Amino acid sequence: MKKRVGFLLSPGFQILDLVAVTVFELANAESAEPAYEIVMLSEHGGPVASSAGVKIETKPFRQARFDTLMVTGSLAIQPSSPAQLAFLRKAAAVSRRVASICTGAHALAEAGLLDGRRVTTHWCYARELQRLFPKARVEEDRIFIQDGPVWTSAGMTACIDMSLALVEADLGLEASRSIAKTMVVYHRRSGGQSQFSALLELEPKSDRIQNALAYAKSNLRKNLGVDELADAANLSRRQFSRSFRAETGQSPARAVETLRVESARAMIESSSHPIEIVARENGFADPERMRRAFIRAFGQPPQAIKRAARKDATA
């Protein structure tokens, strides 16, 4: 029997959130019989315009019974109408699970559905969500979180990660892996969303600085001093330091630390290696230096991230 998945749209919704539909579409293609029925919903029905101006045809949300209800977000958050809040509360009571994409978490929070729950949203809006709804337990450095029947995801493409997890819960690991392969995305991204925003800031403009960063990523166990990186870029030490800062906005040492903590976090979350081995494999002189780097980057030590990863794996 097909599971009904409703996508709740409001005027000005972010159209990238609808890439989640592709995950369920491919899940239908993977199954002998279609597993999901997709329904686009809005308060009044009819065409609803995204923030980009693209319109999606919707049905009015008269019926609240869905297997899964997914609330899309927007770049300009607007208060939910009384009718929408009533619909969300009713849907949460009768549906198997409800989920928010990006800033859609604000609508769930307005409806009181996030009180006492661990949740996430786009990193730009996480602290505002916590300020407005102090009963929610906001974790801003997460790709997605499941807390009972309520799922929340970070911004933009994080809806893919969450949707893959939803399908995996329904159809199994192999189905979600196959869908991820077809979509040419990671089956499970390691680490939180801060690492992706931080690494984007390292994007250099010249091939020489790109070569230096590629060399660093492949040789994190080495000392990776300025002279070695300058050689990889085929530049003098002085030229390299000046060009690197101009193109990335960071010193070579800070950029190398960013690469190391990203790699170390992925290793912590995907393996059972002791912290000491993780530190050594990623070029930290000792675990204490790695701890200080983690606090600078993520606001928490490696041990806390390891505990959270174990908790998620157990869940």
Image: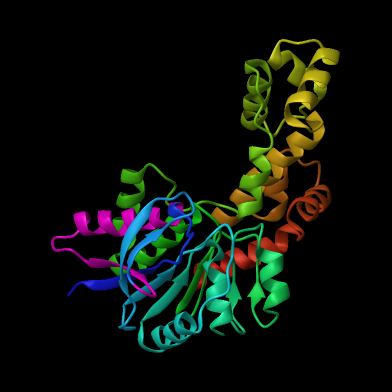
Can you say which quadrant of the picture contains the N terminus?
A: bottom left
Q: Nearer the viewer, residue 182 or 73?
A: 73
- Up the image or down, 142 lies above or below 240; here it is below
> In the rendering, at what x and y percent does residue 123 appear?
65, 58
Q: In the figure, is residue 183 to the left or right of 121?
A: left
Q: Residue at x 73, y 30 (%)?
A: 248
The one of 100 and 82 positioned closer to us in this rendering: 82
Q: Which residues are magenta?
A: 16-44
Q: Quadrant of residue 200?
A: top right
Q: Position of residue 289 (x, y in %)?
A: 83, 48
Q: Position of residue 33 (x, y in %)?
A: 14, 63
Identify the coloring.
Answer: rainbow
139 to the left or right of 71: right
**Is-magenta flag for residue 305?**
no
In the displayed structure, would residue 240 be above or below residue 121? above
Q: Nearer the viewer, residue 170 or 92?
A: 92
29 falls in the magenta region = yes
Whether residue 54 sits left or right of residue 136 in the image: it is left
Task: Identify the image quadrant of residue 116.
Answer: bottom right
